[in-house]
Image (cartoon, grey):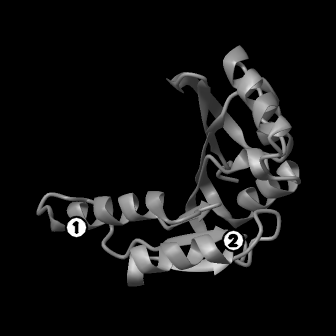
């Protein structure tokens, strides 16, 4: 399946995926498709420039907003987003766009800060006081409900502490087959 990294930043996650795909292709017993396509979008041209230097031809990179993805419907098998969702001002539109570009049966993998942890809520307030550019840090239930509202099913959430004060959540959600 093709991967789309929404909010790819400097391309670190895409770089790890490229290495994983290369290692999988090298294995004689691998069932991984050697034609995997890696695509990243971000609103920051500066971050995309760093990603281009890092990735070379390993990934296609586009300047685009998560709420207006420049791809046809049902283009990707997996949409990923890591530590970008708290920046989005239109989370429902971003999730709707991720749903739109996923193939039936495709998977959304989303990791972000988690407001279920009191320490994360305090750190978020501190960042707001310092005028850091974040929009909203979600509780896991809140984000699961947003996913459900746009049509995702089989939603699984995992919460954990990455390091003090940061609590994180991971969501795996699927676009229904039909």
Instruction: Determine contact: label 2, label 1, CB under 8 Å.
Output: no
Q: Residue at x 75, y 71 (%)?
A: 69
Q: Is residue 157 visible?
A: no
Where residue 24 appears, x then y in whole percent?
23, 60
Query: What is the crowding at mark 1: few (fewer than 14 residues within 10 Å), some, or many (at least 20)?
Result: some
Q: Residue furthest front?
A: 130
Report the residue that reaches farthest toward the left. 28
Task: Using the image, determine if residue 162 lies above or below residue 53.
Answer: above
**Of callouts 2 and 1, the N-terminal one:** 1
Secondary structure at badge 1 equals: helix
Per the image, the residue denoted by label 2 is 44
x 68%, y 18%: residue? 119
Quarter of the image for residue 112 reads: top right
Task: Name the side, left or right, on which 90 lies relative to 172.
Answer: right
- Which of the 4 image quarters holds residue 97? bottom right
Which residue does the numbered mark 1 point to in the structure image?
Answer: 25
Mark in the foreground, 2 or 1:
2
Q: Residues within 10 Å of mark 2 (few under 14, many from 20)?
A: some
Comparing 133 with 108, the one in front is 133
């Amino acid at each position: 399946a093709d991967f789309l990294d929404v909010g790819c930043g400097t391309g670190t996650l895409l770089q790890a995926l490229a290495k994983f795909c290369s290692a999988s292709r090298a294995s004689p017993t691998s069932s991984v498709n050697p034609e995997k396509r890696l695509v990243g979008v971000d609103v920051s041209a500066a971050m995309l420039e760093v990603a281009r230097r890092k990735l070379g031809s390993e990934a296609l990179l586009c300047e685009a907003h998560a709420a207006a993805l420049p791809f046809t419907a049902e283009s990707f098998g997996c949409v990923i987003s890591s530590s970008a969702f708290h920046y989005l001002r239109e989370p429902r539109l971003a999730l709707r766009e991720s749903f739109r570009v996923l193939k039936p049966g495709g998977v959304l993998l989303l990791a972000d800060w988690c407001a279920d942890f009191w320490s994360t809520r305090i750190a978020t307030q501190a960042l707001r006081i310092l005028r850091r550019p974040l929009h909203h840090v979600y509780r896991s239930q809140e984000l699961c409900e947003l996913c459900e509202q746009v049509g995702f099913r089989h939603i699984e959430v995992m919460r954990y502490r990455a390091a003090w004060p940061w609590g994180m959540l991971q969501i795996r959600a699927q676009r229904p087959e039909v």
